Amino acid sequence: MPRRWLRWLILIVALLLTLSFILPYFVPFFALASPSDGPTVRIALFLETADGRLPAIDDVTVTAVDLARREVNGGLRPSFAGVALPPAGNDRTSLRLGLNGYRLRLLETPNPEEALRAAQFFSTKGLKTVLTTATAGGKTVYRLESPAYAALSGGGSRPNALAAVEPAYRQALAAFRPGAQPRRIGPWGFFAAFESPEKAAAAADRLQAAGYEAVLAYRVQNGKAAVGVFFGAAADEAGRTALLGEIGPRLAALLGASAKPDPVGPTDPVVLSERDVLFGAPGNAVERLRVPLAGELAVASGGGAVRVEEKKDGRSYRGQIVVTAASGRLAVINALPVEAYLYGVVGVEMASGWPMEALKAQAVLARTYALGNLKKYGVADLSDTTYDQAYEGLDREAADVRQAVDATRGEVLTVGGRPAQALYSSNAGGMSAHGTEVWGNDVSYLRPVPSPDDAPLRAAPLWYRIQRSDGRIGYVHGAYVRPTGGTNAAGFPYGIVTGDNVNFRPSPGTERAPIGTLAKGEYVVLLEAVRQNNAYRWMERPYTGLELMQMLNDRAAAALPAPLTVPVERLAVAERGPSGRVLALAVDDLLLRPKAPDSFRAFLAPRGEAGVRSTRFDVEAMGELAILGAGGRLRALPEKGAAVSAVQSGGRVTASVGGPSGEIVLLGGKPAGVAGARLSAALPASFALLEDEGALAPDGRPVRVASLVPAFRLVGYGYGHGLGLSQYGAKALAEAGKSYASILQHYFQGAALERRY
């Protein structure tokens, strides 16, 4: 072998040996997704946004989890700017992560009970705190601080700045310990490198004992990480300069003659290491890493997964957890290959156990959405909320979900070679939407198509619309009422309540608060049997004209031509789109037509309540006695030439309408009646009507509740915007033998399936 080739061989072997030592640290942080796994995506788990739609957080706790057994295992491996941080003398099973920003030191005490009392006191004032431990001269002290902010000041233009919250903390501290003043702590200071974490920790202890802020720290420079001590923690550059003048003559004694401290600021690549007290237990302290205000710290797990304790039920995730400063707060991001991400999406957006072809269709759409919406949030591509796609990591994975993702690996839905708008919703209510019915713009490949969505209706439990002995009308779950076999004078069956303190509700479902309770053994009149509100068909509780005025002024102000000044007296659908969804509502003399008609879902609910399920609804104007009959036919009572008689809650037919209860039942077409175009003001506030199908009355006419005061109820179909694929429709089509490709073609006409990797 020529000598030059021998030299090259020796170099290659040496390089491989070197890599064998360093790769265990670097592979978890630099390993990119293999081509078959697609690109890496970044999912925001916590992120401050201008509109506040995503959850935000100040600090986050992560724990190493074994990917297969989902148990704590393996240890965490943090890296900054792609460089692994040296071991810290422990297995790093858990870490607490936050910003090395600007904060207030509220209390420092050797007494852990005092520190905990202070933390609890601040909590009662609605103020968050961070409790850490440090050693000074070999003794432990406890430090209570505010969360860290990425800016010191900025006023109204920077609401996430320390100055904005400082007055509240000062006031609370004065109440807890009169005369005490908080001290500003910041990221300005000095870094001195040492040969080992032990020597750095000893230097930090000497500095603490001398009265200076000092913690173990890591600096990343030129692709290498050094361990050392950070000291100073000044709130600005001037404070750092003043510190150097004070401590300069003592540096050699405190740090050693060979130490050469370098000045650092908020954006320098220095990561601080402290001990953080978790969950109010002084003995339960973990390493806290404070991240500079520029750059990213990534945490991977030797077990293959990382649990984020602050997520509901402590969700676990594949890939890395990345933290960085964004919009003045800590951003927490899950970075992982797109195919692994889909494992945690499909099992949430659909469900394990659904037909495989439906799961495949969902996998293609979720992949298409992800690849078509990269960098949506700047530091992150997508969020884990329904503003994008619901994502719950390992907790919602299942074998059939992974099988569906793997079977469609790399496939996306395209139009003209570009990712389609991969839209989907839970239930289209029998007919998918047209683009103009949702966001106001037409999408050529999204046209209304029939959707077999009624499975939730068939599976929903039975509820009864009942009338109590005092005349009040509402709904109760069928499991808690048993028909007696008897009827009242009008022919309605009696029922008896079989449970204790049974909730009596304004609509057939548990979404709205009860309006009362029923006692065991109470007799009620059964007016109507209906199915519980479900994804296919639903009924809202009645809203009064005053409630409508308030909710529309609150939620729809930008879409109203003028604010409403009196309670709404008339509400009706003014215009519908191609699938029957509402485009405009007539509100008294005003026309409410938002640019995005899907906004009606948010408009039509009081503050603090969820909006209506879909815009495919009808308005039942109870104050006008408008009756919604079969096929959407509206009928007004009393009709000219048709008599109406009142049936009181006990069932007695009477011509003198009224009664002690406040509610009565009207039977259309009975001989005795109330004459005229309007009902007498002697009627109580609300009563029930019978029309032409489905009631428990002997003649089979269903009940409609009416009111003497303006009141409106929405009766609708579907759950979600209805545009694109209906998940329940896809399930039914798959059960009928359709392939995932034909399901997608049904809802996205003209779109094509393409494999991108």
Image (tube, rainbow, N blue to C red):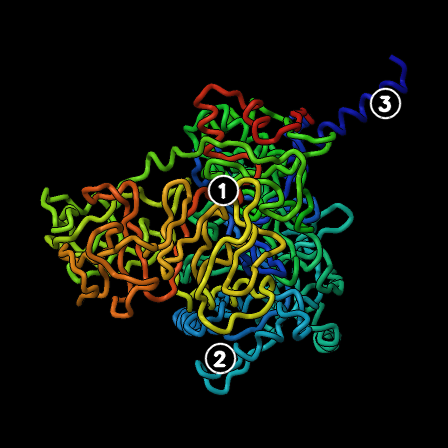
Please tell me which residue lies in front, 259 or 599: 599
Q: For the residues carrying marks 2 and 3, which lies nearer the camera in this image?
A: 2
Q: Does residue 565 appear in this view?
A: yes
Quadrant position of the C terminus in the picture: top right
The residue shown at (40%, 57%) is: 621
Residue 528 is situated, as x and y percent measured from the top left of the image, at 25, 46
Q: Which of the two labelled residues, at mark 2 and mark 1, occupies the earlier sequence position? A: 2
Which mark is drawn over residue 7?
3
Q: Which residue is mark 2?
A: 173
Q: Is residue 601 toward the left or the right of residue 371 in the image?
A: left
Residue 654 is situated, as x and y percent measured from the top left of the image, at 16, 59
Residue at the front extreme, as displayed: 641
Q: Is residue 307 above or below residue 205?
A: above
CB atoms of marks 1 and 3 within 8 Å: no
The residue shown at (53%, 49%) is: 582
Please tell me which residue lies in front, 373 or 597: 597
Q: Which residue is mark 1?
A: 392
The residue shown at (87%, 18%) is: 5
Q: What kind of element bears circle 1? A: loop
